[in-house]
Amino acid sequence: PRNYTISVIPGDGIGTEVMPEGIRVLEKAASLYGFTIEQQWHDFACCDYYAKHGQMMPDDWKARIGSPDAIFFGAVGWPDTVPDHISLWGSLLQFRREYDQYVNLRPARLMPGVPSPLAGRGPGSIDMWIVRENTEGEYSSVGGRMYPGTKREIVIQETVMSRHGVDRVLRYAFDLAQSRDARHLTSATKSNGIAITMPFWDERVEEMAKAYPEVRTDKYHIDILTAQFVMNPDRFDVVVASNLFGDILSDLGPACTGTIGVAPSGNINPDRTGPSLFEPVHGSAPDIAGKGIANPIGQIWSASMMLEHLGEVEAGKAIMRAIETVLADPKLRTADLKGEADTVTCGKAVADALS
Ligand code: NAD
Ligand code: IPM
Ligand code: MN
């Protein structure tokens, strides 16, 4: 039979609550669709590990992870005990860079029966893929802090864009747009104000667009783009953005579909020179952690994306059908979607709905 090995890293807070539901659904999918998943659980990349070891991951974390077919990740961060930039640069952001996961693929889709906070929007009116650059851009370690604590204090952090780095994520986004019915790509920019990197981004988009004559291409400055996500979300199909802009859009898009709790992501290395990582878009949600009420759909949808990446396309699609069935029923969905279910009830319902 087909056999896959995955690294399982639950992380912090609700990461540890939604991960078992993702695993439950993966195991059910494996048994129904005739493949096996070997799980290698890791206790690092979380703030408990930091408390014991003074760092987020062991020095030999790469060797410990080895060469799995994919990494299944929960959420990391516990700002009460570890500053966020330390916990995140010590874990998730390292994975993205070290494994060259240069695409962060984040869908936003309004599901049947789910109430959108946008009045009058029904299923089909929000169905987009956000393609976020994931290894460079505004997330950079180039810069510094001078004269700390004095009145002369200065902080500088450079945005880094390479032609190679921009072109490869644009190519991925154009390929995706080309494969979709709408064949529409929107680029997020800010070339009116950010006058060096963003005009470069626009130039690369224009250049790449020449190779995709069938894809209708447009661009919006990020400020009005956020407004358009709320006013006219049906205008968007594939949206490509730099690291920071993509981060913001990928909370906003899913929020327009009812909650960020359903949103999945694939941190993808399309060249397959290292494992890709699948995780919900949301974080560790300290405000609801420990209560058992977190929405597990973001984790479960990430499992679906992971299976499609592994080649188990039918199983991935089956998970999506099960998610739609469950989300349409207020008794089976969680409180963030005005439902009555807790995390485990919702996760079990998806596993039961799988066929
Ligand atoms: P967050 O996504 O954890 O939470 C934002 C809000 O959304 C909270 O009110 C939370 O209760 C709610 N929420 C999030 N996921 C939910 C779910 N599945 N079901 C129901 N409600 C949900 O963002 P934050 O509060 O800005 O960050 C908390 C911590 O998580 C920080 O340490 C942050 O750095 C980290 N973080 C990690 C990731 C990641 O691991 N990929 C992503 C975002 C934030
Ligand atoms: C995300 C998160 C991370 C990011 C944080 C936690 C560093 O918000 O995955 O969207 O900004 O990429
Ligand atoms: Mn984010």
Image (cartoon, helix red, strand yellow):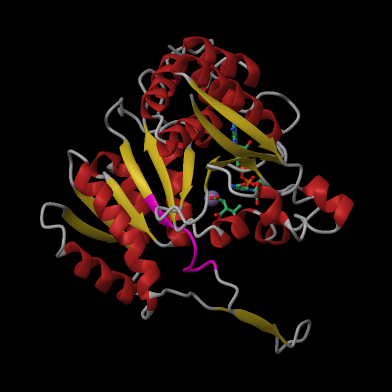
Most prominent secondary structure in the magenta stretch? loop
Give how far across and how far down residue 218 sits, in percent.
20, 58
Residue shown at the point (57%, 17%) measured from the top left? 346
Q: What's the residue at 19%, 57% (across, down)?
A: 217
**Which residues lie in the magenta part?**
131-139
Q: Taking the image as drawn, is residue 1 in sight?
A: yes
Farthest residue in the front direction?
A: 1
Instruction: Decide whether residue 134 is among the magenta residues.
Output: yes
Q: Residue at x 67, y 56 (%)?
A: 62
Please give left or right for residue 124 compared with residue 266 in the image: left
Q: Residue furthest right?
A: 52
Q: Is residue 222 above or below residue 346?
A: below
Q: Nearer the viewer, residue 199 or 122?
A: 199
Q: Position of residue 304 (x, y in %)?
A: 45, 30
Q: Is residue 75 left or right of residue 229?
A: right
- Residue 324's quadrant in the figure? top left
